[in-house]
Every structure is written in C-alpha cells, then in structure tokens.
Image (cartoon, helix red, strand yellow):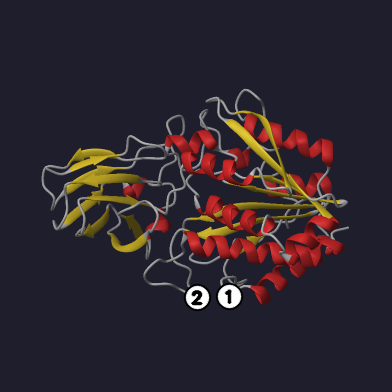
Amino acid sequence: MIKISSDFDSGNIAVVDANDPNDIKLEIKSDGKADFYQWFYYQVDGASGRPLTMRLMNAHGASYVDGWKDYRAVASYDGEEWFRIDAAFDGKELMIKHQPEQDRIFYAYFAPYTTERYRSYIASIQSSPVLSHEILGQTLDGQDISYLRAGNGPRQMWVIARQHPGETMGSWWIEGFMDKLTADGDEDAATLMEKATLHIVPCMNLDGAKRGHLRTNAAGIDLNRAWQNTTMEKSPEVYLVRERMREIGVDFFLDVHGDEAIPNNFLDSANGIPSWDDVHAQRFERFSNLLLETSADFQTKDGYPPSAPGKANLDIANSYVAETWGCLSMTLEMPFKDANVNPDRKYGWSPARCRNFAQEHLTVMAKIVDGLR
C-alpha cells in the first residue's frame, strides 16, 4: 500500500485521496496565518515500480500561477541528489507523473534545505578561523538566529538569505559562498576580508522553513515586506538584523531569493527609491556587468520591470537598505525552474549550480569592494 506523508522538517502536503496510484489527489497547504502557498515537499513509500499520477488539485490558486508554466518538479531517493521529472499544468491542477525505481522517494517544488541541514552546516563551519559566530536572538518559535562575521576591513558588506522560506536555493547559495569564504588559500576571499568586514545571516526565516511555508514566518509575516515597520512581536528576524545594521553601518547589501515565474538568474536594483541617482546606477551596473563576465549562469535581459521613480516599497529589504545607507543594495533572484541560460535537462537549476553561482558572486565582490564608497 502506498503511503504519502509530509510530517517532517520543511514538509508540506495534504493527502486528499491516495487509494489509487493512478489518481492520487493532493493539495498544497497554505502558510498557516497567511494565504500564500506553492511550496510542496512530501515522501511516498511503497511505490517501487508503480506508475504514479499525482494531482496537486489546488495549484490554480497558488501564489504564483505563472510559476507552473514550463515547470518540472524535483525528486530524490536519498534527499541529496534531486533530479527533474515532468509536470503539467492544465490551468487548474498540476499533474506529476513518475514511476519510482525504489520503494521510498521524495518529491518537492525545489531541492529542500531543511533547518536540520542548516544547523548541521553552521556547526561544521563556525569553527573556521576566519569566522566569528553569534546568536542575534530567537525566532517566534524559539530558534536561534545565527550571524556570522568575517574579515576586518573598513567596508561593511552584508549578505542575507532565505527571507522567504520556500526559496531554498538561497540556502544552497549560502553554502557555496561560505565554502569559498572559508577555503584555505582562496585569493578572492583573502582580498575581500582584507578590505571589508562581511556580515552574513545564512537563514532569516527558520520558522517558516521548518513549518514548510512559502513566504512567511510563524506569525504569517512576509519578512521582505517588514523592513520599515518591523517589530519584535511579529518579525524579530528582521528587527534584530536591522538593529545590528544600525550599529555597524552598511556599504553593500545582497539579499538572496528565488523567483517562481522567471526562468533565469537576475539581479534587482533599488532603482525606485527616492534618493536613486547616477551613483547608485553606476555601482549596480558595474557589479552586474562583472557578474555577467564571470558567470555563464547570469543574464541581464530577464528581470523585474523598474519601479516608478520615488515609488519603491521601503518595506522591502533591498529598497530600505539602499535608501537608509545610500549603498549598493541588490536582490538576487534564482529560478525554481531550469534557467533558460545554460540549461540542464537532468537537474535544472540545482543545489550544485547555486553553490557555484555564489562563489562567482564572491569573486565579483572582491573586484568591486574598493569602489563601494
């Protein structure tokens, strides 16, 4: 008998009917105190050699319906290697058909990055001699918010990830970034730490990640819409990071995300802030152009349309930081789908590619650090 479950770290699915393997009816759960949903992650047991047809019946009401266009789900037998499988959206349901080769298999929206893996990774790197580790405080669910610091140069460079918990590519990116930063003899890392102090918050939304949310924390707050009006009662994750920024200052800010609909990697600037000027534009263009030269996975044609002048939402981290500190401030978006630039049919946009992409960002950061002010 087939069993489907998601009662684990970062899991999300509701089983409507799993009696017929050829017509398994499922629904994605919402974020609890908010109506967002799109992230799914579940386990199927007892299906080896059996053709499965899995229907995500409420896909039409998902937060980003355009995300289902040309989308292919991910599957894994061991929770480490995640490969792509076909999916089809008919305007109402997302249908995933697959015949597992082993008795247990996992299916997900993107390769999951659990809070368990996060804790294990932080424990493995915090003993690095180039890092100092601090707990900024706790989330609403009582999880420790880790803050890592490296280097002792005058430029204050901030990197955060996973404000939206379903955007797990942010955590895979952070792994690659930290691996290069802490690697023995890495010239880019050495240059960066000589000229700058790096401030890294590897996972902003631990509660949402553990609960299997798409966008919000335990209180149903979208952290990337809480920067101007954050509170300890509703969004301590943002409040604690923002207060540390006020103590230290910011010369560079990169907020790492994923985008459901656009099938490419891109950077979003803070072009709609009231103080946007040629200096802001030139800093952004220099970083973007250098990343384009450095990475085969980056492009500049696809992305968000520019904001109307002076109309940026200052509750968004990128805009809030740029306006408050007058610095180079960007949002990195990576695809849930495969990237149209440099595609990979087997794995699509993947954890390995996120890690490599992060290391290319560090290389570019080392090149632009002198021109931040």
The answer to whether residue 305 of the structure is visible from this angle is no
Determine the residue positioned at 74% across, 49% down: 130
**Crowding at mark 1 (Cα within 10 Å: few <14, some 14-19, many 20+):** few
Q: Position of residue 373 (x, y in %)?
A: 88, 58
Determine the residue positioned at 16% across, 47% down: 46
- Res. 296 image quadrant: bottom right
- Which residue in the protein does label 2 denote? 342
Determine the residue positioned at 72% across, 47% down: 129
Q: Residue 324 versus residue 6: which sits nearer the camera?
A: 6
Residue 337 in the figure: left or right of residue 308: left
State the SS at label 1. loop
Q: Residue 275 versus residue 99: which sits nearer the camera?
A: 99
State the SS at label 2. loop
Q: Is residue 243 above or below residue 321?
A: above
- Which residue in the protein does label 1 denote? 296
Q: Is residue 232 above or below residue 127?
A: above
**Crowding at mark 2 (Cα within 10 Å: few <14, some 14-19, many 20+):** few
